[in-house]
Amino acid sequence: MHVWDSEPEDIVDAPELAHPYRYFATCDKCRATAQQIPWQRGLFSSYVKSTGPKTIEGKAASAANLDGHPTPEEAMRTRFNALKHGAAAKQALYFPAKPGKYDACETCDIDHDYCSQQVACMRRTELFMRHLIAIQNGDPEMLRENHAIQQANFAALMDDMLLSVISKGVALEAPVYSFDKEGGFHLGNYKDPTTGETKLLTELKANPLLKHIFDLIGKNNLSLSDLGMTQKVQDDNDIKMGKLQQDGVEKQSLLSFQEKQAEQLGKLTEMMKSSKENLKNDPILIEHNQNSGDG
């Protein structure tokens, strides 16, 4: 399917449509006659069907609907679309549109004919715009999905390297060679003293993929220590766990002490009340008060 812009070659009446015409043109590439792209027809129909306020009151009411807009989310979406299709899209020109020539083109779901008419690769443009907006707004959440995909790709890449090392071995034999002053290339060889045969001289080297595997493990915090799987880390965690448990015992003891103290204070109030009652009924005190004229 091809997409292009051109003047219509044929206009057909279509009274059943809101915009009562259909437009046709010939494709420059395949020379097939095609109808106007559907979203443009829908846009024409929306213009025809649109009805707006006519009175001053109606226009004021319609304008009031915009209060509170655009919201922060709407503003971000508008900015994304403006950057993607506007002047700032030049940021993605490092990757010009070359459908089928990038590795990602094999699995890309964007139409290659449509992409070929753009200034830059559509997929790269979207990636550039996401990073640009996220950095300008200080919002890393917009890049979370990209980072998750990258981590999955790193894990898959590391698995492939590990399988290659396992299948080929951690040590590889490489031939010994040298160059003379004239630029000639010479392989190192020697004569076996037992059989008299000339054999190739080799040296043993570590598999070069090992360094890249260790780099990926270290930079992505995937070592046993980072994952808490070493004996030392587990012992440290046990000590910390024991301290936390001891803290819990101390907190429980303090709570029990507070509860007992509150209980004793409650009993003390009752004892004071009972003591006052007993004091009022004391016969010696009553007789004393009567003799002194206080009773």
Image (tube, rainbow, N blue to C red):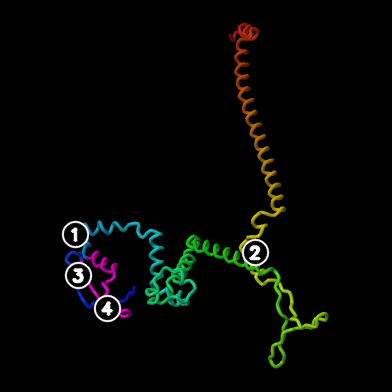
Q: What is the quadrant of the C terminus in the image? A: top right
Q: Earlier in the sequence, mark 4 or mark 1?
A: 4
Q: Position of residue 176 (x, y in %)?
A: 73, 81
Q: Which residue is mark 3?
A: 21
Q: CA distance from mark 4 to mark 3?
A: 17 Å
**Image: magenta residue range:** 19-47
User: What's the amino acid at mark 1?
Assistant: Thr
**Left or right of 221: which side holds 13?**
left
Q: Position of residue 110 (x, y in %)?
A: 40, 69
Residue visible at 65% across and 57% down in the picture: 226
Q: Are marks 3 and 1 in contact (CB under 8 Å)?
A: no
Q: Under tag 1, what secondary structure?
A: loop
Q: Under tag 3, what secondary structure?
A: strand
CA neighbours of label 2 inside 10 A, class few (<14), some (14 to 19), many (20+)? few
Q: Nearer the viewer, residue 215 or 36?
A: 36
Q: Earlier in the sequence, mark 1 or mark 2?
A: 1
Q: Is residue 28 above or below residue 294?
A: below
Q: Earlier in the sequence, mark 3 or mark 2?
A: 3
Q: Under tag 4, what secondary structure?
A: strand
**Left or right of 199: which side holds 269?**
left
Q: Which residue is mark 4?
A: 26
Q: Which residue is mark 2?
A: 218
